[in-house]
Image (cartoon, helix red, strand yellow):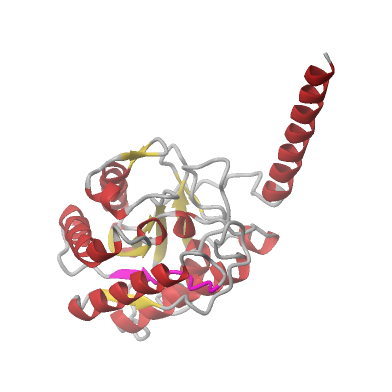
Amino acid sequence: MKIKFVFIITICISTACMRKEIAIRTQYFPKVELRKETLPKKKNLWVFLLVGQSNMAGRGFVEPQDTIPSERVLTINKKGDIIIAKEPIHFYEPTELGLDCGLSFGKEITKYISDSITLLLIPTAVGGSRISQWLDDERHRKVRLLTNFKEKVELGKNNGQIKGILWHQGESDANQADIPFYKDRLSELFLQFREIVGDEKLPILIGELGAYSDRKDYEYSLQINKQIKQYTTSDSNAIFVKSSDLDNKGYNGHFGSVSQRAFGIRFAKEYIKHENISSLTED
């Protein structure tokens, strides 16, 4: 009887702690969803897909500044409706939602392009996904990875022009068995991405892994980053985005909020540089 009582108390304490953790994590999540009823013309809606695993899906702490919307930065909800973007943007893992780099990327891009252009950020990243799972279109955490990507590409093409992909993935491949194949798998997957989009020169921005010296897979992460750099030298439309100096002040070794915001700005600046769009005007 005593053991049963202790077990019940333990469960109650655990549940209370979990609820408190959820309350803290979600306290600044947006309470109101703002629909975008009227979209710009297709040529003026630039679409970017956010692809990869947890650091692209976002695990940072969402703060009030991350929910200040811009009329020129849109995203989708889990129903596929186009809405004004607020963090968190991803929605595939309800118990893990957090700040990603998407909104800071979008807001930074809009500083350099014509006021007539609006961005649509489409989330497709799922935490813990290996690159082989993307290639094999496996179901991971209830999401069929490549099929979902295809569906989101169609959504993007129906409403605008797909201008690029933001990719951050590799932590799940940072092991002895998968590292030797990472560069070739990356090449194969990006070929598929571009075929699906219908643009063989589609820019793909590749963020390197966080190089946290206190992590047990530190050396493996450096090897993945080396392969990412090697790949970008062989693909003129693959753009390397540095992250090795960013802090892992999130949880479980993920990028924290400050790092995610900085990462988004870096993605944007690298895209601007690659596309030479600083002087672009499009009405």
Is residue 116 visible in the rendered structure shown here?
no
Nearer to the camera, 254 or 223: 223
Residue 167 picture quarter: bottom left
Residue 230 picture quarter: bottom left
For residue 197, side relative to residue 266 (left or right): left
Is residue 250 visible in the rendered structure shown here?
yes
For residue 121, side relative to residue 154 (left or right): right
Residue 51 position, x and y percent, is 36, 56
| Magenta stretch: helix, strand or loop mostly | loop
Residue located at (29% from left, 47% from top): 133
Residue located at (47% from left, 54% from top): 54
Residue 266 position, x and y percent, is 46, 77
| 235 over 4 or under it: above or below | below
| 238 over 80 or under it: above or below | below
| 172 over 257 or under it: above or below | above
Nearer to the camera, 52 or 164: 52
The answer to if 208 sits in the magenta stretch is yes
Extent of the magenta region: 204-213
Residue 151 position, x and y percent, is 28, 43
